[in-house]
Amino acid sequence: MKPYSKYLAIAAVGAFALTSCNDTLNVDSPSQMDQTMVYNSSEFATNAINGVYVLFGEDPYTSRMCGVWMQNTDVEAMGVSATTATNHRNAIWPLQGAGNVGWSDVKKVWDNNLQAIERANQVRAGIDKSSIGTQDEMQQIKGEATCLKAFRYYLMCNLFGDVPYYDVAAKWGDEIDKPRTDKNVVYSRCLQQLVDIEPSMKWSDVNTGGIERMNRDFAIGLIARIALFRAGYGMTKDGTMKCADEYLDVNADSLSVTYKDVSGAEKTAHSRADYYQMAKDYCQKLIQLKPRELYPNFEQAFVNEMNYTIENNAEVLYEVAFVQNYGGDIGWSFGVANTGSCAKGTTTAQVAVTPTYYMSFADNDSRRDVCCAKYSHENDTVKASAATGLYAGKWDRALAAKDLGSGSSKGTGINFPLMRYSDVLLMLAEAENELNGPTALAKECLTKVRARAFANSPTYSADVTEYVARLNTKEAFFNAIVDERAWEFGSEALRKFDLIRWNLYATKIEQAMRTALCWGIATNEDLMMDEAVLQQYPEAVNYTNWAPKLWYVKVGKNNLKTDIKWYNEKYRIEEDDATMTAAGWQSVNWGSQMIKRTRTYVYGGTDYGTTTPVKTDNGDGTITYTLGTAPNTKVVTVNSGEPTGITRKDVYAASDYFTRLYRGYSNGALKGNGVVPYVLPITTETISASTVLNNDGYHILDTNMGDGVNVEVATIEREYK
């Protein structure tokens, strides 16, 4: 068992140390015990903080907030069916979650977060009142509680928008039915508490539990992350995306944070620029006080998790310690698909990546085939995946060091990283660029991340040195950071929230839809010869070398991705299908899945549907064609060699995959209004138990629950012979 997991296992099956009951908002009520007594031992405080950690093992986090709900973006996206389902994940994925006002899963996520926040507040209050509260171990535990509280509010503000803020632990008689508090106030208050406790926390390499417990390394990184969110954008009640400077008095105490930088100079953050400075200061603080190197191999952090290996003071600052058989969907809903009869169990595979994300990687980027699994396992046999069947590749239960068992599903015990050191480097690069442009410091941080990704590239200079050197404007460097974070953190549940704080959510999903559509057009000769199509989609010519199919052959029987040899990884080949098939190669659809063709047959102005006409040679020099299906058929007889009078009508449109992917935003590809309705509703059950909570605004009450409208590209008609 991993170092800290045994403590969580105990907490998982035992009662939380503080007695509690449920009130109308499902927040744990405070203990009836005297906190000055019960917190007078570090053992009790440890049990209490375990009661906060253990909530990570419940389904609202381990499945929903950990990954399944962190879609659909330009990076992670799960395809959905034609039927829109409220009260189901099929509404969350295509950005129609605002209609889930009655879904118990949304309520459970709300309750799970507030329960964790209240438990963390109880721990903080208990230690503050304890006679031994100033001891190192007690301060460390208070720091963990503060981090856990801040992280839970980070989740809530990005899932629900503005949420009730509970600054301190509830006491008997307190009013806990609170209205929404602006997210920027929540971020500011959480930051102040983190800033105050961080110096008293322990580094991961000396802390009990290491990176499986929140530590000073992570606390500093979390301060930087939340500072960027405080500087960034979010959905306001009026349904627009704004940063705090645009609509709030940022000089108010509730929106200000006072801290000391690494040199000891005191600063107070008020404005957007101040919070970028704060993020920069804390990234530099971690780098100066606790520097470390990235793993030489990008995949190593995830290999460690698959091997149940913990390394402190290394690349991972903190990872959620999932316990086998209790929580933990990594390798279940999250990771490479395993279906059929598999020795280490099967998956439900609900976190996928887009084909345009795969194609966005540079050819020699080692991260591509780690972030994107273009393979799966079926009956313990490796299987190639089509473009719309790509899953998160960083974790694969078939490779888990433990024998999970053929009947296993959830509860793999595979950990999940909440922050890696490369995140700190890219946050520093982003903050420095925002403040001062692409300085040497900003470029150095970006270079370190890219250098690892392209370490073995034969074109290293072009991929790293020259690439970074060209980024000489603030805009160009920012766009490079947006891209780099996609390539570095794919499937780590960061992209959705990053797009929110940058106010790029709509822009990026429109780009993904447009790219996919143009790629699909480029795979079709008829469309590429249609002048009207090229006038509307001129950039399609940029994708003519992207593959319509990928060709492969099996070269091994070890159920590994290396057992598949790919003839082409990304680009179109010159050989035709017949030549490749004759040579023993198999194919999976790639760019051809980005476009949909509907072929029907028309005669005399009547469309007789998709059934191919039945041709009969009458033997007397005439040919008979039977169109349609009974009872709606048409028989056409013509002399051999004469025109049939039948028209073959091909209607080309965006694929169903991309049309449905973001339908809550766009109601069909490329028809968006610029605002993504990502905010989830507070459920009717919670609202009915409150006198102050409601769902007014935030694009909730005006949500579109349609099935999406396809984008028609062209109609091409030819005589049918």
Image (tube, rainbow, N blue to C red):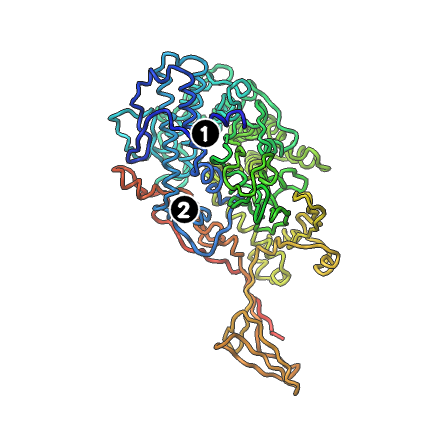
The residue drawn where x is 46% and y is 49% is 94
Q: Which mark is residue 365?
A: none
| Three-letter code for the amino acid on which mark 1 is drawn | Ile
**Is residue 717 shown above or below 378?**
below
Q: Is residue 590 left or right of residue 40?
A: right
Residue 252 place in picture, x, y as percent: 34, 26
Disc nearer the start of the sequence (1/2): 2
Q: Is residue 241 left or right of residue 286?
A: left
Task: Name the residue carrying label 2.
Answer: 97
Q: Which label lies toward us, 1 or 2?
A: 2
Q: Which mark is residue 226?
A: 1
Callout 1 crowding tier (Cα within 10 Å): few <14, some 14–19, many ≥20: many
Q: Which of the 4 quarters of the picture holds residue 437?
A: top right
The residue drawn where x is 45% and y is 55% is 708
Q: Quadrant of the N terminus?
A: top right
- SS label for mark 1: helix
Residue 252 visible (yes or no): no
Residue 10 place in picture, x, y as percent: 45, 27
| Three-letter code for the amino acid on which mark 2 is drawn | Gly
Foreground residue, 540 or 475? 540
Asked if labels 2 and 1 touch by Cβ distance under 8 angstroms, the answer is no
Foreground residue, 403 or 668? 403
Q: Which of the 4 quarters of the picture holds residue 138?
A: top left
How far apart marks 1 and 2 lie (CA) works out to 24 Å
- SS label for mark 2: helix
Total marks shown come to 2
Q: Is residue 78 left or right of residue 98?
A: right
